[in-house]
Image (spheres, rainbow, N blue to C red):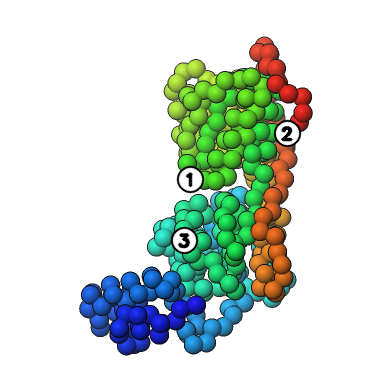
Amino acid sequence: MATIKDVAKLAGVAVSTASYALNNSDKVSQTTKEKVAAAAKSLNYRKNGLASDLKRTNTNTIALILSDLSGPYYSELIQGVQDVTTANGFDLIACSSIGGADSTAVKFLQEKRVDGAIILAHNISDEVTVQSARKGFPLVVLDRNLDSSFIYNIEVDNIHGGYLATEHLIQHGHSEIAYVSGPYNSHDNQLRFQGYLNALKDYNIPYKSKWKIIGDFTRESGYRATKMLIAQRQLPHAIFYANDEMAIGGLEALRENDISVPNDLSVIGFDDIQLAEYVSPPLSTIKQPKYEAGSLAVHVIFQVLAGEKVDHQYTLSTELVKRQSVMQRLSPENSTKQHTNET
């Protein structure tokens, strides 16, 4: 791994000058800063925020990087990470990825301020993630699939979960099913949408683009997306929201417009957050193992730090949770599945 001495040598400056330049000090000129930055980039140099270049030490700390620290989805995930981290005598730092490339979270990755990190943040790019992973600094990603010697992938079977949700609606006589999507750059959302499409195809139901509305996994976006569906005047038979937060926002929009769930329209979500069973009506949803994903992620990191051989790919299953937000249509249209095998 390159040191600051290597950077200084390549840039043709003193070590102290290189240090000033990398820390954006006024003691050196802009030209020198650019020259040193170019040398650091060519050597793939990353400054260490807690240890010197001559003596690197362990921090006994794991970072958990999330898109949103306040979302109810994250509570069980954080608990799973926290329990295993504490049991191994390590500390846990949870930080938000707000700010993207300029965020504190990215500094944790690039400067190795922790011993390993778990990432569930679609706004931290694949490039930054791959460049940050290195020997002795394992990363576990929960929202994408990256090919790197030092990155470990833990995914929920989102395609199957999306299929289960859509199939449940179809089996209750719904053929016009809207999909309220998460962010366009969310890997999880893309897979859930693929499951939705697969189920429509298997049951001979044509996909209609007007039934896909973009949200961002927040309650507010679910509310807005549902208002847009209502504004189209012709409501679908059912709505599949890509997460429970958006579904809860959607229930509020439907309630405001005197649209009864499930009598007028069925609704299903994804995640099975704790609030899902307490809204009115209780929300049918797809349960994913949030606690298990968190505990497995940090367990993998500890195995790697111990020098053990670890698989690079793990897939966790999903489960349909039936509650009262889905109802059989009184006059269901006939839908015939193209095959008899379960997915």
| Residue type indicated by callout 2 | Thr
Graded by Cα atoms within 10 Å as few (under 14), some (14 to 19) or many (20 or more), the crowding at tag 3 reads some
- Give percent across and percent down for residue 1: 50, 77
| Left or right position of 162 against 229 | right
Q: Quadrant of residue 8?
A: bottom left
Q: Residue at x 49, y 80 (%)?
A: 50
Q: Is residue 207 above or below residue 64?
A: above
| Residue type indicated by callout 3 | Val
The label nearer to you, 3 versus 1, is 3
Q: Residue at x 55, y 69 (%)?
A: 134
Do the residues bearing badges 3 and 2 touch, measured as CB atoms within 8 Å?
Answer: no
Q: Which residue is mark 1?
A: 185
Q: Is residue 265 something that shows in the picture?
A: no
Q: Which residue is mark 2?
A: 343
- SS label for mark 3: helix
- SS label for mark 2: loop
| Residue type indicated by callout 1 | Asn
Q: Residue at x 26, y 78 (%)?
A: 32
The label nearer to you, 1 versus 2, is 2
Q: Which mark is residue 42?
A: none
Name which of mark 1 and mark 2 comes first in the sequence. Answer: 1
Name which of mark 3 and mark 1 comes first in the sequence. Answer: 3
Residue furthest to the right: 341
- Give percent across and percent down for residue 231: 44, 23
- SS label for mark 1: loop
Structural distance between the alpha carbons of marks 1 and 2: 26 Å
Name which of mark 3 and mark 2 comes first in the sequence. Answer: 3
Q: Which residue is mark 3?
A: 128
Graded by Cα atoms within 10 Å as few (under 14), some (14 to 19) or many (20 or more), the crowding at tag 1 reads few
Quadrant (top left/top right/bottom left/bottom right) for the C terminus: top right
